[in-house]
Amino acid sequence: MATPPVRKILHIDMDAFYASVEQRDDPRLRGKPVAVGSAAARGVVAAASYEARSFGVRSALPSVTALRRCPDLVFVRPRFEVYKAVCKRSR
């Protein structure tokens, strides 16, 4: 008789992934609160570094709210092709 497959649940914190890649690629961002997205009046946070998350900055948060919570927040424009390449490399 065959053993039934073991079900596994994996939790991956992707909220900080884009921001982590930006901090990896730009040493000036390391240790700083970083948000990937747009700082425009109607902009949105796509990802937030752990430093930014400590201020309550999260993905899908309006940029004006993020900046109110963390005035030193550094916004970086997304580079989706870079994130895709990093994902493919880590397989």
Image (spheres, rainbow, N blue to C red):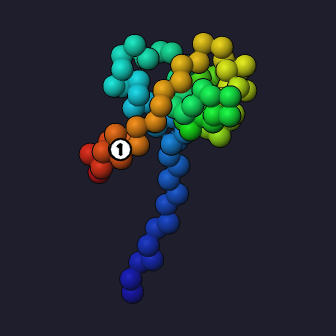
Indicate the position of residue 50 as horizontal and vertical percent values.
55, 26
- Compared to residue 9, the image places residue 81 above or below, namely above
Amino acid type shown at disc 1: Glu
Look at the image and tell me in which quarter the N terminus lies. Answer: bottom left
Query: What residue appears at the point 54 percent right and 19 percent down from the top-left corner?
Result: 74
Query: What residue appears at the point 68 percent right and 34 percent down from the top-left corner?
Result: 42
Query: What residue appears at the point 51 percent right and 42 percent down from the top-left corner?
Result: 14
Looking at the rendering, which quadrant does residue 58 occupy? top right
Indicate the position of residue 80 as horizontal and vertical percent values.
41, 43
Query: What residue appears at the point 65 percent right and 40 percent down from the top-left corner?
Result: 60
Indicate the position of residue 17 as horizontal and vertical percent values.
46, 37
In the image, is 90 to the left or to the right of 46? left
Along the viewing direction, whichever of 73 and 39 lies nearer the viewer: 39
In the image, is 58 to the left or to the right of 16? right
Query: Which residue in the structure is indicated by mark 1?
Result: 81
- Compared to residue 14, the image places residue 2 above or below, namely below
Indicate the position of residue 16 as horizontal and vertical percent values.
51, 35
Q: Is residue 30 visible?
A: yes
Quick one: which residue is furthest to the left in this view?
89
Along the viewing direction, whichever of 52 and 46 lies nearer the viewer: 46
Along the viewing direction, whichever of 55 and 78 lies nearer the viewer: 78
Label 1 SS: helix
Q: Is residue 51 visible?
A: no
Along the viewing direction, whichever of 14 and 9 lies nearer the viewer: 14
